[in-house]
Structures are given as C-alpha cells and as structure tokens.
Image (cartoon, grey):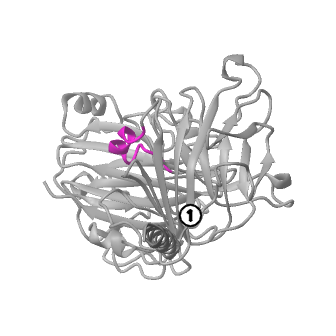
C-alpha cells in the first residue's frame, strides 16, 4: 500500500513538472544563454574576453582593441528581448539588436541599433544609439526622468520590444526610449564590451555581465503605450501614438496647404518645391531673396515644433518662431526668434555675431548652441531639429536629440541678451503671445521635411 502511494505521488510530481514546462514553452520565451557555456554565440570585431562565470556571461575589457561584440548566431526580426545586466562603473557597454556585419560595410564592422548601458554620470542607460551609422537616435536629453532607472553596482533588468517599425526600451520596468524607424528590420543580437583605448590602464579588466538572457518571437504583446517622447524617423508620418499625444503634421510630403508666402496668401511659385517628400528652396541667382514661407496658423504661447533639415555646402537658412508681422521691415523677410540652420564650416555667418551665436541650432544672434561632438550631421545628411516652448516660458532647442539651447522667454537675462543683439531696435522682440512658424529663404539650397507641431496647454 505504501509503495503504491509513493508511486502515485511520484507520478503526480512528474505530471506537474511536465505541465509547468509545457506552460513555459507555450508562453514562447526561449533562453539565449544556457548558463554553462557560449553555445549559440560568436565573437566579432574586438578582442575583449568573454566567458561564463557563476551562471552569467562576463565580458572583460582589454587595452588597445576596438569595440567587441558577442553575437547570436541567429538573426531576429520581431521580438521581445530581456536580460539582466551589471557593469563596472568605469565601463560603457550596450546590447545590439537587429544588427549586421557584412564585408562591404567597413570591413565587417558590427553596425545597427544599440541599447545603451551607461553607468556614468551622464546616465543615458536604455537610450538608443545607431552603432557605426547615424549615432544617437534617442538620447536621454529628451527623457530626463528615465535617467533614474539604472542602478549602479546592481543588476538591472533590460527589456527591448522590437515589433515592426517600433523599438521600445525599458530599464527596471521604466520606459526609456520609443523610436519608430525602418532602416533595419532584422539582424543579430549581441553583447558589447566597449573599447577602452590604450592610454588609461585603470580601465583594463573592467567587466560587464549578463544573465537571464531570453527572447520571445511569437505571440508578441507589447507593453501599454506610455507618454514618453516618440522619435519617429520615418519621413512625413505620424503614428497613432503620436496622434494620441497631440502631434499634427504640417507637411505630409505632398501638400503645402498649411503654408503660404510671408508676403501673400498663396504658396510661392518661384524656387520653392514641395511634392517630392521635401519642402525645398533652390539656390538664388542673386536677383531674389527674402521669399520666406510661414504657417497659415499662429502658434503660442506654448508648443513643440519638430522638423528635419538638410543643408547643401555653404548654405544658410533658419527656422523661425513667434514671427510677428508688426516687426516686418520690407514685406518679404519675417522677424522672429530663430533656430539657426547653417553650414558652420563654409558659411561666414558662423564667425559673425558674438561667441558663435550664429552657428547651427543657436538662437540666432542671441544665444550660442552648446553642441557635443557628433551632434551635427554631415552636409547632405538630415538633421533633426526641435523647438520646445514650455508653458512656464522656458524654451529649448534640440539638435539631433541633444539639448543645445535653453532660456526663459521674457526673463531679464533674455531681455539683456536681446538688447545686445541685432534685434535691440524691435521693442518686445520675441515676446508676442502667438506667432507664425517660418522657413527662411536666405538664397541658398536647403530642404525640410517631417514638420510637425504639438500645442501645449498650461
């Protein structure tokens, strides 16, 4: 009788274990790391050391070697990825997703989306970087609240949801980045040990560790949408989530029904084109300039305005806001606060003004933009600009998601700066409650696209 009971109990436990395993399999998660060895992975590019210790993958930095990548042997398209990460406070690292390595691209250099692991005081962990391609796609300058998500000297849970054109990242359950992009839809996943160069020997031997590395590729259910900023890199489009946040397109790639000449009610017929996915002003032969265009609607007192612009060599233009026709001097050129659009290297205006306050992304002739290395794209590439006018009067300029200017409209410091600028003769300059948004004709060939605006309530 006793033996029979033992047999039944054993059978019950076996069935329970099988049901549990079946449930786990049905849930769709697959372990990418078996906790014992590096089966299913291969190393590319640098010579950092990867090994398995205490059930974790440990990457150890090595002097004088490029970025190292431990890469899955399989490619993944749509997925939800999770892992736990712990990193030395002196070491930078990252998790590559949808990444590639091909002989025809920089001799096999790994390139693609990277989810940042950043224990430095900058605290951009979870931000999205495009390794060896476009640079930062989503810095934490645009989501500063998420800087608190990552914990130093501790294991941190990362989650990445790559579904269709959407890439969203989470650190310890906190939403960090939300990017819409269609450049790469499939690729491998890899664990990066960042290069430490060859000068600072104190960095040698610093480590980053990963465990509980898993992926799900079927029955994908993304996390509920949040209200963090969305970076949509697909030209002239709005996602449903952006629409829900209040964004509206000012240009859809074909129609300019929301734009008109500054000096008239119609869109200009000379030198401006608009039906090829860009609003472009052609270079002038010198006989005509000042052919600005403005929105038909006034915007203010609080709004966000986002746009992409592409410069030709030596070009000068500008994106103006709070343009008020009471300051109009000649009927052609609108006067207002200006986000400078300029080829700093080739146009002489960059050396005029004061302390560089006419360089790209500056508040023209008033406040110099403070741009980190790599913030400006090469001539012929698209730059992303954004102007935020907050309800409290704080105004910010962003260039490629780096905050480069901040001031308080109407403050005494702002008035003092205006008094020392070329606008000192315009009483109340920059203080109108509402104004037009303007794209400037400065006689040079410049293109714009992905123009979108969001009205902010007090």
Region rendered in magenta = 138-150
Quadrant of the rendered structure where residue 57 is? top right
Q: Is residue 142 magenta?
A: yes
Count the marks.
Answer: 1
> Is residue 347 in sight in this rendering?
no
Spot occupied by residue 125 in the image (x, y as percentages of width and height): 48, 42
Spot occupied by residue 373 in the image (x, y as percentages of width and height): 59, 36
Of 23 and 178, nearer the camera is 23
Spot occupied by residue 364 in the image (x, y as percentages of width and height): 41, 41
Quadrant of the rendered structure where residue 374 is? top right
- Residue shown at 39% from the left, 59% from the top: 306
Most extreme residue toward the front, as rendered? 1
Residue bearing mark 1: 215
- Residue shown at 24% from the left, 58% from the top: 435
**In the image, residue 278 above or below residue 156:** below
Which quarter of the figure is the N terminus placed in? bottom left
User: What secondary structure is found at the residue carrying circle 1?
Assistant: strand
Q: Is residue 225 magenta?
A: no
Left or right: 29 as drawn, with respect to 43 = left
Left or right: 411 as drawn, with respect to 38 = left
The 10 Å Cα crowd at callout 1, few under 14, some 14 to 19, many 20 or more, is: many
Spot occupied by residue 254 in the image (x, y as percentages of width and height): 47, 82
């Amino acid at each position: 009788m006793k033996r029979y009971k033992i047999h039944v109990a054993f059978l019950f436990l076996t069935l329970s274990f099988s049901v549990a395993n079946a449930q786990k399999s049905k849930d769709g998660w697959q372990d990418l790391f078996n906790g014992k060895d590096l089966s299913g992975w291969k190393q590319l590019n640098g010579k950092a050391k990867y090994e398995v210790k205490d059930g974790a993958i440990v990457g150890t930095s090595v002097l004088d070697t490029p970025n190292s990548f431990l890469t899955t042997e399989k490619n993944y398209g749509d997925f939800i990825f999770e892992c736990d990460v712990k990193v030395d406070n002196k070491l930078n690292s990252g998790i590559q997703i949808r990444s590639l390595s091909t002989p025809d691209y920089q001799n096999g250099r790994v390139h693609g989306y990277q989810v940042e692991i950043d224990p430095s005081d900058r605290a951009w962990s979870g931000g999205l970087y495009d390794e060896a391609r476009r640079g930062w796609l989503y810095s934490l300058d645009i989501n500063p609240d998420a800087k608190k998500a990552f914990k130093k000297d501790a294991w941190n849970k990362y989650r990445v949801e790559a579904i269709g054109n959407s890439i969203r990242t989470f650190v310890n359950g906190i939403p960090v980045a939300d990017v819409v992009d269609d450049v790469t839809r499939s690729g491998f996943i890899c664990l990066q040990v960042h290069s430490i160069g060859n000068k600072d020997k104190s960095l040698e031997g610093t480590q980053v560790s990963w465990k509980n590395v898993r992926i799900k590729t079927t029955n994908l259910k993304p996390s509920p949408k949040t209200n963090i900023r969305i970076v949509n890199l697909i030209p002239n489009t709005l996602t449903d989530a952006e629409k829900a946040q209040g964004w509206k397109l000012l240009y859809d790639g074909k129609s300019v029904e929301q734009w008109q000449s500054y000096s008239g009610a119609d869109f200009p017929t000379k030198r401006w084109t608009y039906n090829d996915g860009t609003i472009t002003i052609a270079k002038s032969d010198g006989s005509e300039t000042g052919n600005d265009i403005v929105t038909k609607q006034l915007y203010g007192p609080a709004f966000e305005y986002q746009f992409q612009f592409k410069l030709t060599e030596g070009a000068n233009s500008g994106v103006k806001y709070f343009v008020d026709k009471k300051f109009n001097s000649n009927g052609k050129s609108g006067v207002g606060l200006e986000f400078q659009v300029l080829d700093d290297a080739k146009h002489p205006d960059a050396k005029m003004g004061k302390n560089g306050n006419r360089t790209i992304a500056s508040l023209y002739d008033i406040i110099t933009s403070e741009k980190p290395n790599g913030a400006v794209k090469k001539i012929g590439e698209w730059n992303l600009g954004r102007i935020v006018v907050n309800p409290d009067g704080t105004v910010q300029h962003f260039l490629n998601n780096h905050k480069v200017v901040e001031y308080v409209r109407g403050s005494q410091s702002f008035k003092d700066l205006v008094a020392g600028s070329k606008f000192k003769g315009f009483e109340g300059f920059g203080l109108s409650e509402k104004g037009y948004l303007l794209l400037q004709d400065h006689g040079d060939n410049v293109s714009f696209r992905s123009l979108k605006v969001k009205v902010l309530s007090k």
